Image: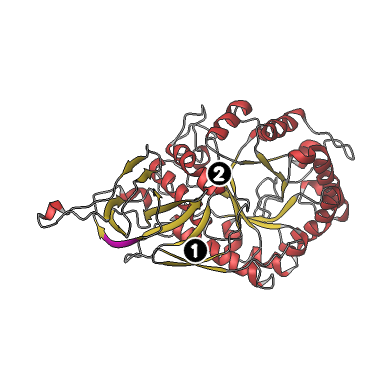
Amino acid sequence: MINSILKPLTTVLVAGSIALNTVCAGERFDVGVCTHFSQNKGIVEMNLRSMKHAGITSIRDEAGWSSLERERGRLVMPERLDQYVRKASAAGLDVLLILDYSNRLYDDGDRPRSPEAIEGFCRYAEFAVRHFGKDVNLYEVWNEWDIGIGLRPPYNVGGSPEDYVKLLKAVYPRMKAIDPDITVMGGGSTSGGVKKGWLEDIIKLDALDYCDAISIHSYNYSARFPERSPETCSEWMTGVQNMLRRYNGGTGVPFYVTEMGWPNHIGRTGTAPELSASYLARLYLLARTSPSFRGIWWYDFQDDGWNAEHNENNFGLVRPDLTPKPGYHVLTDISDLIANGQYVGRIRSNNKNVEIIHFTREGHDTWAVWSSDDGDYQVIVKTDSPAGDLTIHQLGHKPYRIGWGFRDWVSRRGEFIPDRLSIVVGSRPVLISGDMTDVSVLHTIPRMRETANEEKK
């Protein structure tokens, strides 16, 4: 069940910002990706090597019930499923395993709803937990129960909250009896299911008593800007976490997003690879501002095909042959800060479209700065002690070091000011690292250029 641990609230005053810092040092955050190894896609060893280089900490895949129980009452783990899990674990990646979909041997291939089918699903889940042991410590009960994915007609329709919680109540204690240390996620619903009340309905049916965390999918790529932006998504997810908190006595519920992405297909709902990479960074950075947010699994690591017009072929961070896309390079640059950095607070500026978030990593300060409307802004900061250099890193590019000093020579009226620094930011976050103790934002000035606005609409 949800382990409700109240964390002390510490007010942090930092460079013109006030934040409630509830993130405890050492608290885990998963920088995850979804894979399709269970569908025999990709070359496992090469994919895992590429993931490790990018700083990815976890994969999400499945070991479907129908693959393990092909003969009633006899459970066997197929070698190809066993091997991808073992290899991922050996590579130091945490495995989030989905327990999902129906079995034609029960309920005619419908979701497990009858006592007999539920018992069969529980035996399958127990078998998976025993078989993988410590190589798997994260499990998700089903994938998008609220819609008909993974089911054949006539059962490929949305499933009820009542039936889902019935299954969760049966399977959760049996999994935990085998290994109390595993984390069992409940929910796994689509963003549409959340918005229509499906998730809240399972919470009302006491789902929090039969899982360790709640997971959702948060896609918004089919909307128009700004509804499709990472900032809008983050605000919506904060509302979901607040709803969970209300049902948990005011205490945050461990919260995971196990699918999210902006696919790069051609068409109205597609997002250009460069902008998608920027959105990835912003979403991960914003996620770290919430103490109950524990991980995001980007959907997915590898493109599923070469069809440029099909969304499902274009979600990846890499192409089908592992050629990196911009999102791969951006995630490589940011993964360590996301996984191991500590959120300090938001930095105040005079512009609502300029986002500035303060992190620390091993005693070093980092500001993440970007524009939420994807425009260009000149940000001028001031320090009380202009002694050391700063490192400027636009994600996806090589970082550089710069000293303090600014002169508005363009207007031909400015004198050199040694305690100021100017940088132009846009849709792609810029990391400013160094001693930010006495740094504050002085001005933000629009410096708009003609950009590919159609990419985000």
- What secondary structure prevails in the magenta region? strand
Which stretch is magenta? 440-444
Disc 2 secondary structure class: loop
Sequence order check: which comes first, mark 1 or mark 2?
Answer: 1
Residue 45 lies, with reference to residue 146, above or below; the image says above
Please, which colouring scheme is shown?
secondary structure
Residue receiving disc 2: 299
CA separation, marks 1 and 2?
A: 20 Å
* Residue 88 x, y percent position in the rendering: 67, 34
* Residue 281 x, y percent position in the rendering: 46, 48
Disc 1 secondary structure class: helix
The residue located at (84%, 45%) in the rendering is 126
Residue found at the far right of this picture:
73
Residue 387 is at least partly visible in this image: yes
Q: Quadrant of residue 16?
A: bottom left
Residue 100 is at least partly visible in this image: no
Quarter that holds the N terminus: bottom right
- The reply, left or right, for residue 74 in relation to residue 348 is right
Residue found at the far left of this picture:
412
Q: Label 2 crowding class (10 Å Cα cut-off): few <14, some 14-19, many 20+?
A: many
- The reply, left or right, for residue 390 in relation to residue 94 is left
Residue 309 lies, with reference to residue 28, above or below; the image says above
- The reply, left or right, for residue 201 in relation to residue 346 is right
The residue located at (69%, 73%) in the rendering is 249
Q: Amino acid at mark 2?
A: Tyr
Q: Is 393 colored magenta in this rendering?
A: no
* Residue 302 x, y percent position in the rendering: 54, 35
Residue receiving disc 1: 235
Q: Amino acid at mark 1?
A: Glu
